[in-house]
Structures are given as C-alpha cells and as structure tokens.
Image (cartoon, rainbow, N blue to C red):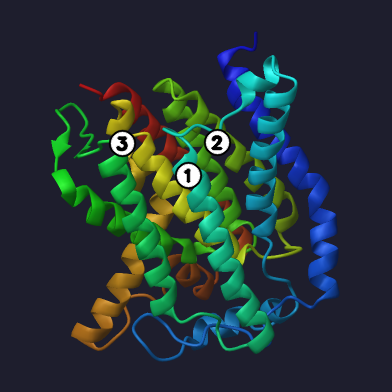
Amino acid sequence: MLSLSAQVLVPSAIAFTLGIGFAPFLAAALYRNKAWKKRSGKLAGIGGGGTPIFNELHKEREISTPRMGGILIWASVLATAFFIFVLGKTIGGGWAQLDFINRRETWLPLFALAAGAIAGLFDDLLEIKEGKGGLSRARRLSIVGVIGLVAGWWFYAKLGVVAIGIPFAAPLTIGWFIIPFFALVTLALYAGGTIDGIDGLAGGIFAIVFMAYAGIAFGEAQLSLSAFAAAVAGATLAFLWFNVPPARFYMSETGSMALTLALAMTAFASDTLAHGIGVFVLPIIALPLTATVATTLLQVFWKKVFHKKLFRVAPIHHHFEAIGWPAAKVTMRYWIITIIASVIGVTIALVAIP
C-alpha cells in the first residue's frame, strides 16, 4: 500500500526522469532541423505597431536557439500518464494506485494539455517553416476560447459546477455563466503565457505554480488531480534543467499554450468541484502571469489615452531588461515572487474554506 504522498510524488519523479532522458534527443532533433525563428523579435505588439526594444534585446538568441522545447513538458506528462495507466492495468498493485487518469479530476486537464500542445505545435511549425509569426493572434485566441467554452460546458453540464469558491464565505453561484467565465479565465491565462521570453523564466514559474496546485488538490483529497499537477511540475523542471541560461531550447507556443490551458482546468477542478477555493487564488499564485497581462493592458491603455508609454517595453519583465537588469536577475526575482505568492495562495485556499 503506497502512502498518499507517494501517489502524488512518484508520478512527478517519473515525469522528471523521462524529461531528463528525452531532452538530449529532442535537442538534437531541433538543432538538426534548425527549428528556430528565421528572423528575431515580434512582428507587432497587442496595441499594433512594432516592438523595436524587444527585438533589440533578443535579436541574436531567437535566430540561433530552437523553439518547441515545450514538447519535452507535455510529452513527458502524457507518457507518464500512459505508462502508469498501462502498468496499473497489467500489473496492478502499487501501479494501480499511482494511476491518475480520472474522469472527474483529470480528464479535462489532460485533454487541455494535449489540445494546447497540438495547436501550439502547429503554430510553431508555421513560424519555423514560413517565418511569418505562425498563426494570427485572432486564430490563437479563437482556439483557446473554444477550448475554454467546451471545458466550461463540460464543468457545467457534466460535472454540475455552477459556482466559484470564495474565501471565508459561501460559494458564489453564477449558474450557466460559469461557461463564459471559464473561457475568460482561460484566455487571460493564455495571455499571461507571453511571459516566455527570458531563459528559465517561464519554466521556473510554471513549475512552482503547478506544484502549488498539487498542494491545494492534495489538501482537498483530490489525489489524481494532485498527481497530475505534480507530474506537470516535474516535467517542467526537467525542461528548466535545459532552459536555464544559456537555454538549449525555448518553450514557445506548444509549451505555453499547453501549460496555460492545463492550468486553467486544474484551477477550476480544484474549486467548488472539490468544495475548495482554486480559482479565486489563481491570480495570486500565478502572480507573474497576472502582472504580464495587467502591464500589457496598461501599456496599451497609456498609449491610447496619454499618447506615451508607461513602461519602456511591456510585459514588465522586458521593461526590467530594458532598464538594465541582467536577464538572470529578472528570472531569479520572478521565481522568488512566485514562491511567496504561491505560499500565500495555497494558505488562503486551504484555510479559508468556510
């Protein structure tokens, strides 16, 4: 009989091990096929126009470092889930206890991870082959929005979720509005995924955030969801091993879309479905993603209203680069902030249930 903590931590260790073993083969394939941008920088910002400061900061690395490193993350998680599932069905025993494929808790997070991976991979391939920025922003947002609506409908119609957990109070019932709200949260998280852009930054943040949700789900006795989140954290740490400066490869769209979609599903699955508080604390735990979205919108608003920039470049982590902070300093401080924010968020989630 495996302990409850082992049922969560063993999948994480397996995902990390698979990721470490798979990474050299992935890196070799990406370099062999020159899987990097044909020209550096972004073609346009959210508010329209160019992004000259960003392009100057990243003009060299983006055309020599491969994209699609996010394959390492989702492939390791899906392989871990499949590996444990097969052994659980054929051998049973402890392997059956480790199986975290669960209709109520992890079907949607696994689906979102795979769907985001495929859509993001298609975008990356277009970027690499054609060098025109991949899928348009409107198409990417449409894909994410549709997945969010489908997932919201599933939570509402199949799982009966009609409310959002509120700390120290009764859940806020919103009925069928849970569907568009789900899509809105998913889109906001995806927008926060643009935090990818500095070596080690996104990998460290996502690893911390998913481990925080593993803790929340564990505290709510959702062992399958906790094991899934821990497996994602483990796979992301394996990616981070090869993404710290100088990065062997970048996460890019296939990684950020997969992770942000999976994070949205995890947050909602750990909410009223488990009589918990998972969505309310999401902006706190994922504070760097929240700041990414907020500062980008503020920048657009400032330029439209005051006809000047609020930050030298948005999102704000690139502003810190632009004013002279070394990239490693930005990354390390963001990791520290994420750890502190996650501790606060997990504490609220586990002690504020009425």
Disc 1 target residue? 109
Q: Does dot 1 land on a helix, a strand or a loop?
A: helix
Please state which of residues 257 and 300 is positioned toward the viewer in this rendering.
257
The image quadrant where one finds the N terminus is top right
In this view, which residue lies farthest toward the top?
Answer: 1
Q: Is residue 67 left or right of residue 177?
A: right
Q: Can you tell which of label 2 and label 3 is closer to the viewer?
A: 3
- Please state which amino acid type lies under the numbered disc 1: Pro
Taking the spot 41% from the left edge, 45% from the top edge, the residue there is: 265
User: Mark 2 sits on what residue?
Assistant: 228
Say which label, 2 or 3, has the lower sequence index.
Answer: 3
Q: CA distance from mark 2 to mark 1?
A: 8 Å
The residue wearing badge 3 is 159
Q: CA distance from mark 2 to mark 3?
A: 19 Å
Q: Position of residue 20 (x, y in %)?
A: 78, 46
Q: Earlier in the sequence, mark 3 or mark 1?
A: 1
Q: What amino acid is at disc 3?
A: Leu
Q: Residues within 10 Å of mark 3 (few under 14, many from 20)?
A: some
In this rendering, position of residue 56 left or right of residue 144:
right
Asked if disc 2 and disc 1 are in contact, CB closer than 8 Å, the reply is yes
Residue at image location 26% in from the left, 25% down from the top: 352
Residue 139, horizontal then vertical, whole percent: 42, 77
Which percent across, then down, holds residue 205?
53, 49
